[in-house]
Image (cartoon, rainbow, N blue to C red):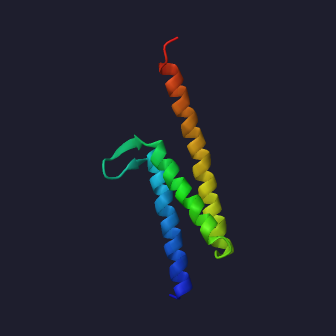
Amino acid sequence: MSQGEKDAALLFGLVMMFQTAAMQHMGKLKNPATDKIERDLDQAQFAIDTLDMLMAKTKGNLSDEEERFMKTVVKELKLNFVDEMGKAEKSTESKEPT
């Protein structure tokens, strides 16, 4: 395996690690340590922001495939995050006294 191939594999792994963390924090995946669905939208936002920063810092240094992959992952995470924020707002509204 060449160094370029190794670096690409490491990058894909890193992106997937943050993707999985964000999905777990949004309550879309079970936390494997507790085997429970847990939500921490602040931590999900941190993981998404980290991937955004990584994309900005590596701009111009990624292959087309790497760039497409990162953009797709970040887009998917942001759409899911907006969905979860909407659920959180509805939940808060339903608990408020009228």
Q: Percent from the top left, x then y, of residue 1?
A: 50, 87
Which residue is painted at 65% across and 61% down in the image? Answer: 71
Depth check: 97 or 10 in front? Answer: 97
Which residue is painted at 61% across and 65% down in the image? Answer: 55
| Residue placed furthest toward the left | 34
Task: State left or right for residue 43 relative to residue 72.
Answer: left
Tell me if residue 3 comes above or below residue 71 in the rendering: below
Which residue is painted at 55% across and 27% down in the image? Answer: 90
Depth check: 92 or 13 in front? Answer: 92
Depth check: 9 or 61 in front? Answer: 61
Q: Percent from the top left, x then y, of residue 49?
A: 55, 55
Tell me if residue 12 comes above or below residue 43 in the rendering: below
Regarding residue 12, the answer to whether it shows in the image is yes
Which residue is painted at 60% across and 41% down in the image? Answer: 82
Q: Quarter-wise, where is residue 75 in the image? A: bottom right
Q: Percent from the top left, x then y, of residue 85?
A: 55, 37
| Residue placed furthest toward the top | 98
Tell me if residue 64 comes above or below residue 3 in the rendering: above
Q: Percent from the top left, x then y, of residue 29?
A: 44, 48
